[in-house]
Structures are given as structure tokens and as C-alpha cells.
Image (cartoon, grey):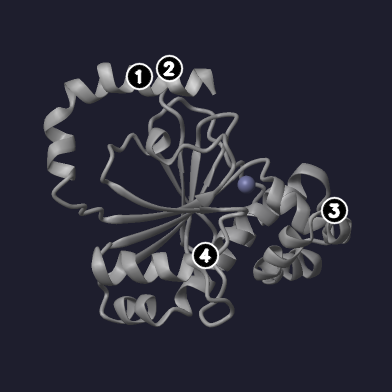
Amino acid sequence: MRKLLKGVHQFQTSYFSTHREMFEQLSQGQHPRILFITCSDSRIDPNLITQTEPGELFIIRNVGNIIPPYGALKSGEGAAIEYAIEALGVKHIIVCGHSHCGAIKGLLQLGNLTEQMPLVYDWLKYAEATRRIIKEHYKDYEGEALLNAAIEENVLTQLENLRTYPAVHSKLYSCELDLHAWVYKIETGGVVVYSAERCSIQAKHNEDESDEIKQESPAHLSVNGNGKSVAVWNNLK
Ligand code: ZN
């Protein structure tokens, strides 16, 4: 706690005082263009990895970056989505999963959670489609490859859940909203951007294309077999 209190003091005396104008403006209202949905995992910092300032990202965080389908649960997630679209008018929704996600590890071994973490077990039911896809279509995968496939499939599952919200559906219909699926790699700082179609992930796996590019370029876009883009933003070195 002492570290945090010291941090607050440091924030007030350094960052805040040099960005006073920005904070005064923010006190008048927020106008984020992006709804960023990611995991509660302490290793993910949305503002850090996107190099954005306060006021730029409206953020939903929970275990496993999961969005229950519309009507399945009266959840804070639903309220935040509705608010982001109707009140704030966000133009993009990003679902950002991450490597080494404990929630997705749990999803792959659900049986172990029932007694120890019944609430997590219940919550992961909203990622059941991910579990089923992995069980039925990734039979040859194991270990880290299996986990990575589940993390990737889950961001697409959650985009599909997002589409069940009337507010999202209506804005997609009028082309006023874009949905994006990302996976952040903790160990490299890379961000893989998936096409919002499942076959793009399968095609990528079939081609045995690495998630990470080897060359040191700030951005890289590869087009997979079905012509859909799989962009890999490598960390700047
Ligand atoms: Zn996670």
C-alpha cells in the first residue's frame, strides 16, 4: 500500500501538474472513440500498450475479456456497452485477449474449478462456445499451442457475443461501428490483430504462420490463405 500512496503523491506532483490543462478539459466531459475490452490480468495495461492518454479509451475489464450474450445476464458489461455506444458514441470496440491468460487456462480444464472457484466456473460459461470450438476443431493441439488457439478463438467468440446487443447490431447495420479482435503478447509486446472471421485463425494455423514476426519493423501485415488480413504489430525496438 505504501508504494501506491507514494505513487499517488508522485502523480500529483509530477504528471498531473505538467498535464493540468488536459485534466481540466477532461473534467468537462469524456469523448473516447474506443471501447476497449480486456482481461483483469494485472499484466495488461491498455493505456500503456496503446500509448493513449486519459479520456481516450472507455474500458471494460473482467476475467477472460468475456462479454455475456445480450439477455443472458443483467451485467455491468451490458450496461457499459450500451453507455459506450449510446451516450459516448464510440466508433470502435476492441476485444483484447492476451498470452498466458489464466481464465482461458481455466476454461480448458473447467472440471477443476467447480469446487474451488464456483463463481469463475459460472462466469466461464459465457465462453462455452470457445471451449467447444477448441474441443471439436483443435484435437491435435496441446500445451501452449492449445492455450494460444483458445485465447485467439475466445476474442472472436466475444465479438460474436457483442453482436447480440441491439445497440451494437444497429450501429454495425449503419456502418457506424467497427469491431476488432486483438491478442497482446506479454513476452514480446506484440499485438496480433485478427480478422473478425473465424476462418482467418484456422487458416493461419494451417499455414503454420508464426504469431510474431522476426524482422524488426514497427508494423507488419500478412494476408492469409483466404485473403483476410492478419496483422501483427511487433513491438518497436
Ligand atoms: Zn487473462
Number of numbered callouts drawn = 4
Q: Is residue 139 left or right of residue 183?
A: right
CA–CA distance between discs 4 and 2? Answer: 52 Å
Q: Residues within 10 Å of mark 1 (few under 14, many from 20)?
A: few
CA–CA distance between discs 1 and 4? Answer: 53 Å
Q: In the rendered image of this protein, does residue 229 appear above or below residue 160? A: above
Which residue lies at the image location 15% right of the left edge and 28% below the top edge? 20
In this orientation, does residue 65 appear? yes
In this orientation, does residue 203 appear? no
Residue matched to label 1 = 9
Q: Which mark is first along the chain, 4 or 1?
A: 1
The mark lying in front, picked from 1 and 4, is 1
Picture quarter with the C terminus: top left
Q: Are marks 3 and 1 in contact (CB under 8 Å)?
A: no
CA–CA distance between discs 3 and 2? Answer: 35 Å
Q: Are marks 1 and 2 in contact (CB under 8 Å)?
A: yes
Locate residue 163, reporting x and y percent.
Answer: 46, 76
Residue matched to label 4 = 226
The mark lying in front, picked from 4 and 2, is 2
Secondary structure of residue under mark 2 = helix
Q: Amino acid at mark 3?
A: Gln
Closest to the observer, 28 or 113:
28
Locate residue 114, reporting x and y percent.
Answer: 85, 61
Residue matched to label 2 = 6
Residue matched to label 3 = 116
Q: Is residue 190 left or right of residue 17?
A: right
